[in-house]
Amino acid sequence: MSDIIKLLPEAVANQIAAGEVIQRPASVVKELLENAVDSGATEIQLIVKDAGRTLIQVIDNGKGMSFNDARLCFERHATSKLRTADDLYRIQTKGFRGEALASIAAIAYVELKTKQAEDTMGTRVTIEGAEVSCHEHCATQDGTSIAVKNLFFNVPARRNFLKSDNVEMTHVEEEFYRVALIHHELAFTLFHNGKMLYHLTPSNLKQRVVNIFGNSFKDKLFPVEQETDIMNIHGFIAKPENAKKKKSEQYMFINNRYVRHPLLNYAVEQAYAQLIPQGYRPAYFIAIEVDPANVDINVSPTKVEVKLQDDKLLFGFVHAAVKKSLGTMELSPRIDFELDPIFELPQRPSDRPIVLPTVDHDPNYNPFDSVPQHRGQSYDASKPYQWNERVDTGRWNDFLQGLKTEQVEHRSPEQLEANLMPDNSQQEWEIPDDFPYFIVQDRFLFLMLNGRAMAIHLANARERILFDRNMKALMDTPISVQQSLFPITVTLTPAQADLAESLKSEFLQMGYELEKIDLTHFAVNGTPNDEDGEGDLQTVITNILDEFKSNAFLHKTDKYQNIALCIAKQYRSRPMPLQSASAVAALLRQLFACSCPTVSPSQRKIIYDLDPASLENLF
């Protein structure tokens, strides 16, 4: 029987290795930026075209390479950072395996120009799909310039799996942030399609965070400092009110390397446990320095996941350092250790007799009286019944009357939908001008309508109404703009400003007139005519852009649905003036005229039918 095991060709082996190391353009950006940092550069430029599909170029002023090293660096496992296996436990550099350049060269056209300061001539190497086509002397500046063109040109299946340019550029920017944040002493510049997005000069960590994420962080960052014999912690945490539902601004670094470690992330979030709502994530930028022998970074090809020798001990240090910072800034309750922990009870005066307490009650009080006669309260018939007010219970009795078993039949969700929208016409649902209802804490509306008892979630209803209004504005009839007498200026990051510029026409259709002032500032010259008050436009605009970018990243919706949903979610929780039955009726007419009045665009339930079967399910 003949032998069946063969050695893979070099080209195939390189492509397999590239599949582990290079997953998308952002992977190339990570490897090239880390090599530039390792070269001792003080200025690094990143040039990207078409989100990295066409070109990724990194230019640095580092020490460069010799004629022979420029060719050898493209061989697999060729590295200047390891000599023995023991060196794996003392790694201080970004890269060490020697796989990155070989993997990149296997799936792209690569041109390398490099020169050492002491040499008179530089070196030029060009590679096409792992085949060296040129290796010669050339004239170039000190340092290294490496250009990666037509990524995945010989692996079309991998190229077809790339997402849109917006999604891929989001990944590229994220890799840029991870390197630029921890190396704030270096200068970084990012160009995309000929436009400069970031120009970061050498600074401290706080200034670098502000330069990347915007001036909104300037007054929201508090330092974290902790020095021990085992580890040193420094960095910044953000105010609890700056917490968001997504983990977009959480950066943990160990020995100047960005890492993802669930336990250390949990340590930070636990310190915020009593300060932020459940489901929200705090923003932090924390750098940890430990003995390299206690960290194993040789876990995955991307070197993002790491193993720690004593992660529980590090958990305690990180948690204590963050908790200390929160307590120092008086953001969480503190214990005064200078005081005796024994409770201090007041002394009873010796001349005061002891009097037993008595209970006073009104024996004539009946909570079901139609008109209350206690505590001198008066009844205002123009106001709906509020949960925390004792007013006319006649509405409540009328409401309860419809819950009797013999009067209300169980309806399935399909029947409920059919009852709300009896046909496919555009005719509005019949809403009477007066009907029993009451409101609980401005959040829930309970009403009796056409013999049915229903509960409506007001915020979800508002989100549905605003979403349908925004979609109509984008597809058919733009919302009128109310010009501002004094325009509001909002400050954005370069990436947010670029996104706002691309969505300016969509903003205008929905009533927001944005005018670009410079690279990071926009003037809001007008807001929707039917909005009550502008609110905090800085927060609204930035949240809309962040939400849009996050949804695009997750590939959730198309462009129009994405921005319509983002704006609706920003205004869903605004209070609605429902002080009369006519106002409630107007809200219901808007809701039942929507395309789907029972479910919000965020997939939350709007209407709950209060029949006996539904109530039984609650218990």
Image (cartoon, rainbow, N blue to C red):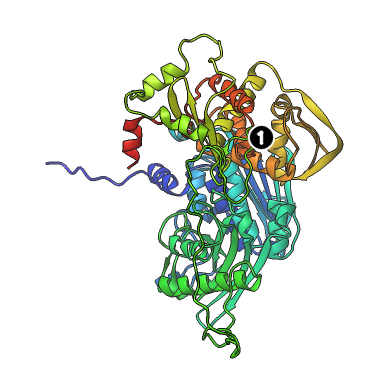
Residue 188 visible within the image: no
- Residue 373's place in the image compared with 531, above or below, is below
Q: Residue furthest bottom?
A: 350
Image quadrant in which you'd find residue 439: top right
Give the answer, above or below, for where 523 lies relative to 102: above
| Quadrant into which the N terminus falls | top left
Question: Mark 1 belongs to which amino acid?
Answer: Pro
Q: Residue 5: where, in percent of width, then height? A: 23, 45
Q: Is residue 270 left or right of residue 380?
A: left
Please, is residue 111 above or below residue 450 in the view? below
- How many discs appear? 1
Which residue is found at the position 51% from the left and 46% from the top?
104
- Residue extending farthest front: 364
Name the image quarter holding residue 171: top right
* Residue 21 visible from this viewpoint: yes
- How would you rate the neighbour count of disc 1 (Cα within 10 Å): few for under 14, some for 14-19, many for 20 or more? few
Q: Is residue 163 above or below residue 356?
A: above
Q: Quadrant of the C terminus?
A: top left
Counting from the top left corner in percent of width and height, residue 442 is at 58, 40
Answer with left or right where residue 484 lies relative to residue 438.
Answer: right
Residue furthest to the left in view is 1
Q: Position of residue 558 (x, y in %)?
A: 55, 27
Q: Nearer the viewer, residue 267 or 307?
A: 267
Q: Nearer the viewer, residue 114 or 337?
A: 337
The residue where tag 1 is placed is 577
